[in-house]
Image: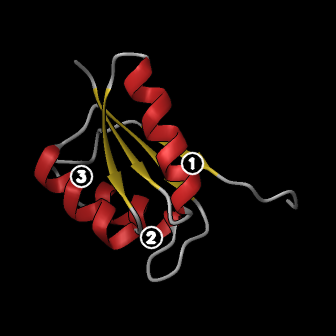
């Protein structure tokens, strides 16, 4: 079963994504902020990461930067999520 880490600070969005992934047979992991997401990613080494761009404490770009700097997480596929409508 593929592990997918979802990093999202909006609780409703996080819960919806986790529920949809479970329904599709994945093993979702969740983090409510970037700092927590980095910790979980380093501990669990998921198969893919879905990460919000705009979050307090540590935004998605800093999450990606931190994971790419670690040899254990450098090759995890990473997908940005955002609700922003501006470029």
Residue occupied by mark 1: 80
Q: Quadrant of the N terminus?
A: top left
The image shows residue 7 at horizontal and vertical percentages of 43, 55
The crowding category of the residue bearing disc 2, from other C-alpha atoms within 10 Å (few below 14, some 14 to 19, many at least 20), is some
Q: Quadrant of residue 42?
A: bottom left
Q: Nearer the viewer, mark 2 or mark 3?
A: 3
Residue at (34% x, 16% y) in the render = 25
Residue at (61% x, 68% y) in the render = 54
Alpha carbons under labels 2 and 3: distance apart:
14 Å
Residue occupied by mark 3: 41
Which of pointers 3 and 1 lies earlier in the amino acid sequence? 3
Residue occupied by mark 2: 62
Q: Which mark is residue 12?
A: none
Q: Give above or below for 22 relative to 8.
A: above
Which of pointers 2 and 3 lies earlier in the amino acid sequence? 3
The crowding category of the residue bearing disc 1, from other C-alpha atoms within 10 Å (few below 14, some 14 to 19, many at least 20), is some
Q: Give above or below for 76 relative to 53.
A: above
Instruction: Identify the element where label 2 is drawn.
Output: helix
Instruction: Identify the element where label 3 is drawn.
Output: helix
Residue at (27% x, 23% y) in the render = 2
Residue 39 as seen in the image, left or right of residue 16: left
Q: Nearer the viewer, residue 24 or 86?
A: 24
Alpha carbons under labels 3 and 1: distance apart:
15 Å
Q: Cβ–Cβ below 8 Å for labels 3 and 1?
A: no
Residue 31 as seen in the image, left or right of residue 45: right
Residue at (32% x, 60% y) in the render = 37
The image shows residue 38 at horizontal and vertical percentages of 28, 62
The image shows residue 69 at horizontal and vertical percentages of 27, 61
């Amino acid at each position: 079963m593929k592990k997918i880490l979802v990093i999202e600070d909006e609780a409703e969005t996080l819960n919806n994504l986790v529920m949809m992934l479970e329904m599709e047979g994945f093993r979702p992991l969740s983090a409510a902020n970037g700092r927590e997401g980095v910790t979980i990613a380093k501990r669990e080494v998921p198969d893919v990461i879905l990460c919000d761009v705009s979050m307090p404490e540590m935004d998605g770009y800093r999450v990606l930067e931190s994971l790419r700097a670690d040899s254990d997480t450098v090759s995890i596929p990473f997908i940005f999520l955002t609700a922003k409508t501006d470029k």
